[in-house]
Image (cartoon, rainbow, N blue to C red):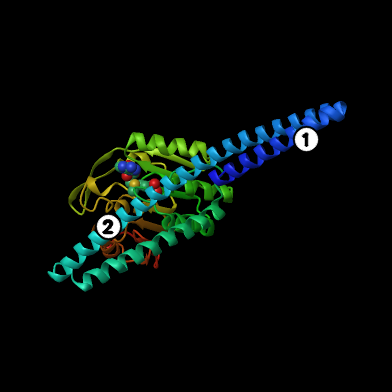
């Protein structure tokens, strides 16, 4: 309540009180009973007015506090926006300065812009792929995030789609993880087939096994720990999974190559085909992840040169993927 309203209310109440008192004195002499009733009514009215005044005062206090807090918040917002504007204009000034000195060319800026636009597009593509994955393979529990060390949704979608369309009896997944679980989910959807993943690291093997159990796909997916051991490939000693772990595996319909990690050696995934060639089904499909990397580009070239009956198709996935299939009847390597 504003001070003017308070002043006017007080004056009004004093005038009413004076009028009521003089009327009351007159009435008390001529009609005492009416004077008593009027006195009681007047006291009640005065009490109610007093209570109203107190409540109104309190409400005003609360309103004032709220208005003060709002004003403080707005001031803080204004300060933050001003600081952000200042930081932005500083950055702009830096970029403009670099442009003036020729440290950044307009072509560089255009490339940066294109990279940003492309990465936003990649994100969209991954979300689209993930939505399709959920629909096709229907997990009922939460899964860890894809991308990074794990396969990206675009590759997972290729794997799930390949499993659903080719209905493989045996999938071998080199480098265990999310890929193993999604392949297991797709196989469970089909009601048959199994995926065996190879993993050199016991703790990652345990993580993948826990995921397989959590998603109730143990009937279709398993992980085998196989230490990395020296292997001769084209006369060169390389590290690859202990092939004893694969002894019972034949007629592999789908081979997914996403391990060992690149830091275990140059062209670390090259041995996959020499090690497993004789264990592949005649119409096997081989899918290699990270096919945009120099090592993997060289690996595909070597595989195509060594096994001329293979042909390769590149998929425009964010990390790149190569799909290799046989175009001629299965024979041994050309070398
Ligand atoms: C590219 S990852 C395999 C990913 C798997 N195919 C998937 O989709 O999740 C290759 C190997 O890297 C190792 N690895 C997995 N996650 C890792 C991490 N967060 N840090 C370091 N190595 C990791 C594991 O040994 C794995 O077999």
> Which residue of the protein is positioned furthest toward the bottom in this rendering?
107
Q: In terms of image quarters, where does ligand 1 lie?
A: top left
How far across and down, in percent of the image, does residue 287 sit?
A: 38, 57
| Classed neighbour count for the residue bearing mark 2: other residues with Cα under 10 Å, few (<14), some (14–19), many (≥20) | few
Residue 56 place in picture, x, y as percent: 61, 38
Label 1 sits on residue: 23
Residue 239 place in picture, x, y as percent: 23, 44
Residue in the image at 45% along x and 35% along y: 210
Q: Circle 2 is placed at which residue position? A: 86
Callout in the foreground (2, 1): 1
Q: Quadrant of residue 246?
A: top left
How many numbered discs, if any? 2
For this rendering, which residue is in front, 24 or 176?
Answer: 24
Residue closest to the eye, 104 or 189: 104
**Picture layout, residue 152 above or below residue 247:** below
The tag earlier along the polypeptide, 2 or 1, is 1
Q: Is mark 1 within 8 Å of ligand 1?
A: no
Which residue occupies 53% across, 41% down? 217
Residue 5 numbered mark, or none: none
In the picture, measured across the screen, residue 54 lies left or right of residue 165, that is right
* 273 shown above or below 32: below
Work out whether residue 89 or residue 335 is closer to the camera in this orientation and state it: 89
Q: Circle 2 sits in a helix, a strand or a loop, which is it?
A: helix
Is residue 270 toward the left or the right of residue 26 in the image? left
SS label for mark 1: helix
What residue is drawn where x is 63% and y is 36%?
A: 53
Q: In which quarter of the image is the C terminus?
A: bottom left
């Amino acid at each position: 309540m504003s001070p003017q309203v308070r002043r006017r209310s007080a004056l009004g109440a004093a005038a009413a009180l004076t009028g009521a008192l003089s009327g009351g004195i007159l009435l008390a002499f001529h009609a005492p009973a009416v004077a008593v009733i009027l006195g009681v009514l007047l006291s009640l009215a005065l009490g109610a007015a007093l209570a109203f005044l107190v409540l109104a005062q309190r409400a005003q206090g609360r309103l004032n506090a709220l208005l003060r807090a709002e004003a403080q918040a707005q001031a803080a917002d204004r300060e933050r926006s001003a600081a952000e504007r200042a930081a932005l204009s500083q950055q702009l000034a830096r970029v403009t300065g670099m442009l003036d000195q020729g440290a950044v060319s307009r072509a560089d800026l255009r490339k940066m812009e294109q990279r940003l636009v492309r990465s936003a597009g990649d994100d969209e593509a991954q979300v689209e792929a993930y939505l399709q994955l959920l629909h096709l393979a229907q997990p009922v529990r939460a899964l860890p995030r894809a991308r990074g060390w794990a396969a990206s949704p675009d590759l997972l979608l290729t794997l799930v789609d390949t499993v659903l369309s080719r209905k493989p009896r045996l999938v071998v997944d080199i480098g265990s993880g999310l890929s193993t679980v999604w392949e297991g989910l797709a196989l469970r959807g089909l009601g048959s087939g199994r995926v065996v993943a190879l993993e050199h690291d016991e703790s990652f093997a345990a993580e993948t096994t826990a995921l397989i159990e959590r998603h109730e796909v143990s009937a279709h997916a398993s992980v085998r720990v196989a230490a990395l051991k020296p292997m001769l490939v084209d006369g060169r000693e390389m590290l690859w999974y202990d092939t004893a772990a694969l002894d019972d595996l034949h007629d592999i319909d789908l081979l997914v190559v996403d391990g060992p990690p690149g830091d275990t050696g140059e062209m670390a995934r090259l041995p996959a085909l020499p090690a497993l060639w004789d264990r592949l089904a005649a119409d096997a499909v081989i899918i290699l992840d990270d096919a945009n990397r120099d090592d993997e580009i060289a690996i595909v070239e070597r595989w195509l040169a060594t096994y001329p009956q293979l042909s390769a198709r590149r998929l425009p996935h964010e990390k790149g993927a190569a799909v290799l299939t046989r175009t001629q009847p299965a024979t041994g390597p050309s070398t």
